[in-house]
Image: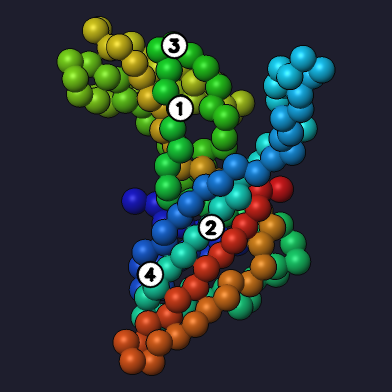
Amino acid sequence: MAEMMLGGIAIRLQSGAPVQEYSPLGGVTVARRSGGAAVKIQHWRKTGITIRGTGWMGPGFAGLDFSQPLELRCTKQQSLSTTALTGTLPGTPRPDDSPWALAYVDGDWRRTPVAVAPDRTFTITAVPGALQYQVCWRPVFMVFCEPPPESMDPASNTHDWTITAEEI
């Protein structure tokens, strides 16, 4: 399985299995018209990523240049559910880990081939009787982040660390 990476540095399990969280960031406002009807105004949308770990060693990021954008390769998958066989992924898949697709047939999910082009358009191979499909991928982001806060518990010899990143 692919490892999580920040700036080309792999986060190894000895630094703690990375707990990953994606949060939407965006310039979204709900405004009201004179009659009270709500109108959603969206200026932009990006992703916030939080990664935490606890292991017997730190993640080793002291050599990274946090003043520059860094590539973040995540292992927490993203997914898109659809009834169509074609579409466009809303995110960028890792170049070292191909997207995959599942078909919902007879109450269970089954793997089915999917082709994803460089422009993120996908084509799923149809499965007879499928009610729904899901395309999954592990994303890569270009992010800004600061060096992670780290702590150590000498009683258990564990290191805790947290990275908070924002997609550029």
Q: Name the residue under label 4.
A: 16
Q: Relative to 87, say whether 138 is above or below.
A: below
Q: Which amino acid does label 3 sit on?
A: Ala
Tell me if 151 is positioned left or right of 106 in this view.
Answer: right
* Residue that lies at the very extreme toward the bottom in this rendered image: 154
Q: Distance between the residues labelled 1 and 2?
A: 21 Å
* Residue that lies at the very extreme toward the front in this rendered image: 35
Q: Distance between the residues labelled 2 and 4?
A: 14 Å
Q: Where is residue 93 in the image (x, y as percent from the top left)?
A: 52, 38
Q: Residue 84 carries which label?
A: 3
Q: Name the residue under label 2.
A: 50
* Residue that lies at the very extreme toward the right in this rendered image: 34
Q: Which of marks 3 and 2 is in front?
A: 2
Q: Name the residue under label 1.
A: 80
Q: Is mark 3 on a helix, strand or loop?
A: loop
N-terminal label among 3 and 2? 2
Q: Which residue is drawn at 76% across and 27% down?
A: 31
